[in-house]
């Protein structure tokens, strides 16, 4: 994948916002890859968790927003409890989802009005509420 | 003894089999679980962003209700409620600045809440209040020869501040099941995520997870799996319907709430377990092994 780097991107508001929302220092990550190795969803992701973190360091907002990775994270926290640098990767992913779901020009990732009557009947409430908490603005 | 308990939404409906078996079994162990009056939704997931204090109010208001009603402890049996309540409580205890804001947000309440209530999972009550050794003595129907696969999922043990057990290799469920007389399977998949809320919009991801986790249990000879989270339960039990469609070789396996096995081991009426709410019927297995009539 070809990416374009620039000091503007590295020092962008996007990086600051992700650091602020997650409460994490993004430069703490030294790319060991332990988060990607242990992530139970990584098989389905187009970018590995450690690659997403590297892209945040580089301010590559478009590449991250166009990837499915943060939407396949189940917030299971395996990455966060294993990170040797103490980086809360799951909190960074939450911040990345919020950058999208709080954008008034973007659609919800999951649209609650599209949930069928059959799903409402079948699914436990905790599944629906947690899903909407993660995927809607 | 009496302890306040917080049920949460799913325990009152889809997971009635968890609540009813828990209440009956704990009563048998002389622990009366008293439902907190006027409880509200816990929020189901802990808001992880630093500016999202509004989502901390729902869990904290529940803890305030416990304090108002004279309690200093509250028990939950749902892993998601447990996680959300415990982390919100940790936040208000650990962060002075946020505590001030959260207390201000709740200024219309008659009492202040600053983290005074202790959040316990029912497994902790069984381990630390009842005691597994004492529990062993109260077992009337030892689950001898039953091979069980303990499944923790995520929210019962992670992150560090939950502090229920070891993060990578928790053993509280194993110790509990051994006290009931069962045989426990060592399964490396026991803390793997079930796919959680993806069961709404990414069913295939949940099917893949479920197949991997359940097959690991089956290959190790498990008769059944044991868990505590109603969302894990839905994904492990009810999603077997989809797993079978994708993987024709998949044999199926009954899934128990830990409280259902507790009720059986204590010799309680089978009806307290509401097995009609379990997708894979566990009764044939229990009858075959003579644990129930």
Image (cartoon, rainbow, N blue to C red):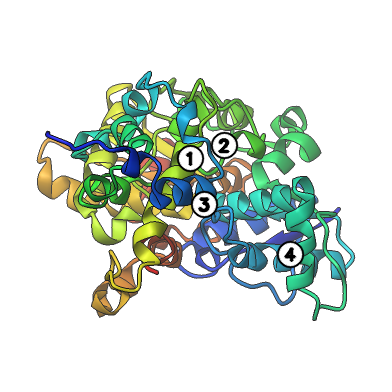
Q: Earlier in the sequence, mark 4 or mark 2?
A: 4
**For discs 3 and 2, the disc positioned in front in the rendered view:** 3
User: Going by the image, does B139 lie left or right of B279?
Assistant: right
Which residue is label 3 attached to?
A21
Mark 1 burial class by Cα count in 10 Å: few <14, some 14-19, many 20+ = many
Mark 2 burial class by Cα count in 10 Å: few <14, some 14-19, many 20+ = many
Q: Residue at x 49, y 70 (%)?
A: B13
Same subunit, tags 1 and 2: yes
Residue A56 in view (yes/no): yes
Which residue is label 4 attached to?
B102
Give the percent coordinates (x, y) of residue B116.
Answer: 85, 54
User: Going by the image, does B184 lie left or right of B77?
Assistant: left
Q: Nearer the viewer, residue A3 or A75?
A: A3
Which residue is label 1 attached to?
B154
Which residue is label 2 attached to?
B157
Query: In the picture shown, does residue B24 fall above or below B166?
Result: below
Cα distance between the residues tagged 3 and 2: 24 Å
């Amino acid at each position: 994948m070809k990416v374009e780097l620039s000091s503007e991107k590295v020092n962008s508001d996007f990086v600051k916002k992700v650091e602020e929302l997650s409460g994490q220092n993004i430069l703490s990550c030294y790319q060991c890859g332990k988060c990607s190795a242990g992530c139970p969803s990584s098989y389905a992701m187009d970018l590995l968790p450690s690659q997403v973190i590297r892209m945040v360091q580089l301010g590559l907002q478009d590449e991250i927003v166009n990837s499915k990775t943060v939407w396949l994270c189940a917030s299971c926290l395996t990455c966060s409890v294993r990170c040797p640098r103490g980086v809360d990767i799951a909190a960074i992913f939450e911040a990345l989802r919020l950058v999208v779901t709080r954008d008034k020009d973007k659609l919800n990732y999951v649209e609650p009005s599209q949930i069928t009557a059959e799903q409402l009947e079948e699914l436990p409430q905790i599944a629906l509420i947690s899903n909407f908490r993660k995927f809607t603005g | 003894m009496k302890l306040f308990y917080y049920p949460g939404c799913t325990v009152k409906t889809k997971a009635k089999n968890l609540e009813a078996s828990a209440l009956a079994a704990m009563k048998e162990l002389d622990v009366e679980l008293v439902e907190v009056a006027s409880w509200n939704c816990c929020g189901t997931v802990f808001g992880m962003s630093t500016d999202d204090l509004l989502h901390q109010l729902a869990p904290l208001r529940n803890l305030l209700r416990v304090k108002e009603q004279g309690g200093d402890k509250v028990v939950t049996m749902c892993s998601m409620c447990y996680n959300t309540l415990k982390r919100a409580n940790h936040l208000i205890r650990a962060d002075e600045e946020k505590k001030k804001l959260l207390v201000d947000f709740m200024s219309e309440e008659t009492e202040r809440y600053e983290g005074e209530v202790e959040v316990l999972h029912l497994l902790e009550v069984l381990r630390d209040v009842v005691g597994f050794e004492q529990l062993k003595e109260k077992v009337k129907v030892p689950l001898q020869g039953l091979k069980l696969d303990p499944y923790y999922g995520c929210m019962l043990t992670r992150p560090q501040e939950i502090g229920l057990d070891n993060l990578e290799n928790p053993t509280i469920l194993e110790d509990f099941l051994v006290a009931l007389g069962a045989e426990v399977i060592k399964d490396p998949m026991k803390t793997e995520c079930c796919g959680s809320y993806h069961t709404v919009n990414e069913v295939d991801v949940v099917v893949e997870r479920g197949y991997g986790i359940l097959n690991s249990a089956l290959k190790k000879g498990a008769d059944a799996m044991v868990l505590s989270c109603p969302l894990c339960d839905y994904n492990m039990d009810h999603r077997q319907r989809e797993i079978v469609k994708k993987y024709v070789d998949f044999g199926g396996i009954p899934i128990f709430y830990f409280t259902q096995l507790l009720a059986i081991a204590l010799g309680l009426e089978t009806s307290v377990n509401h097995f009609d709410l379990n997708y894979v019927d566990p009764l044939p297995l229990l009858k075959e092994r003579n644990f129930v009539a």
